[in-house]
Amino acid sequence: MTLSSHLHSAPRATRQNGRIVAIGTSTGGTVALETILTRLPEETPGIVIVQHMPAVFTAMFAERLDGLCRIEVREARHGDHVRPGLALVAPGGRHMSLTRNGSGYAVDVRDGEPVNRHKPSVDVLFRSVARVAGADALGIIMTGMGADGAQAMKEMHDTGATTIAQDQASCVVFGMPMEAIRIGGVDHVLPLNLIPEAIINYDKGRL
């Protein structure tokens, strides 16, 4: 099945400059992220990622992906600029938020209380993306237990962002995407193998 057969929603708000992609995932997400990031071209919009993972492993995970991908992938550091061709993975044990930096974006990485029992939390990232990027963002919620990210994805959706949930058949655990769909925060429900194409189409203004 092609991507076009999955896309049925009305067009979202008109985007300006500074497209950004925000991805949140948990159980099963390491494989899902590898599937997506290894299929993206170098000119992909800047990507910010929360994968629920202990602090010891996020740097190694990002380093491994960096060796497999055409884009650069690394663990985020406080103040890092978000730019095309770069994916920043939130460090385990720290929250990551998006901030404005002139005409572009940067990340704020800091300690804090767990949100939805997680640190980093997808809700923390997505809520900041809704506030800072609005309609210039693409939000993707993928396989994972619980509801982290669902409410903030609805906030992204309501500010004009385009939102995608991974479908049940391709999820290891359908909790996070299911909750985002249930509360009306999702524009498109896609199988994992079509999400890379959706990101590419988003960058071209076709999503």
Image (cartoon, grey):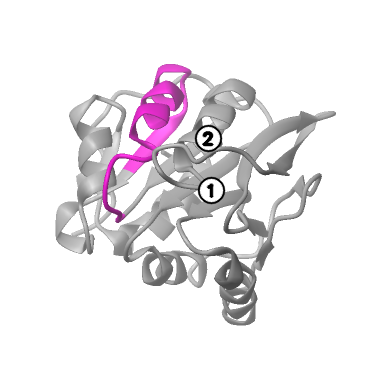
| Picture quadrant of residue 140 | top left
Labels 2 and 1 touching (C-beta < 8 A): yes
For the question of whether residue 18 can be seen, the reply is no
Q: Which amino acid does label 1 sit on?
A: Pro
Residue 139 position within the rendered picture, expressed as x and y whole percent measured from the top left: 45, 39
* Vertical side of 151 occupied by 33: above or below: below
Q: How crowded is mark 2: few (under 14 residues within 10 Å), some or many (20 or more)?
A: many
For label 2, the SS is: helix
Q: Is residue 120 left or right of residue 9?
A: right
Please provide percent x and percent y for residue 46. Answer: 65, 49
Q: Within 10 angstroms of label 1, few (less than 14), some, or many (20 or more) residues?
A: many
Left-right relation of 35 to 171: right
In which quadrant of the rendered image does the N terminus lie? bottom left
> Residue 73: image x %, image y %?
65, 66
Q: Which mark is residue 124?
A: 2
Which residue extends farthest left?
169
Say which amino acid is labelled 2: Val
In the image, residue 98 above or below residue 171 = above
Where is residue 97? Give x, y as percent.
63, 37
Q: Nearer the viewer, residue 118 or 1?
A: 118
Looking at the image, which is closer to me, 30 or 44? 30
Give the spatial CA distance, label 2 vs label 1.
8 Å
User: Is residue 194 on the magenta stretch?
Assistant: no
Task: Answer left or right for 82 relative to 191.
Answer: right
Which of the two residues, 32 or 85, is positioned nearer the viewer here?
32
For the record, the magenta segment spans 143-164
Quadrant of the snapshot with the C terminus? top left
Q: Is residue 146 found inside the magenta-colored segment of the image? A: yes
Identify the residue shown where x is 32% and y is 58%: 194
Q: Residue 120 carries which label?
A: 1
- Spot the residue most to the right: 102
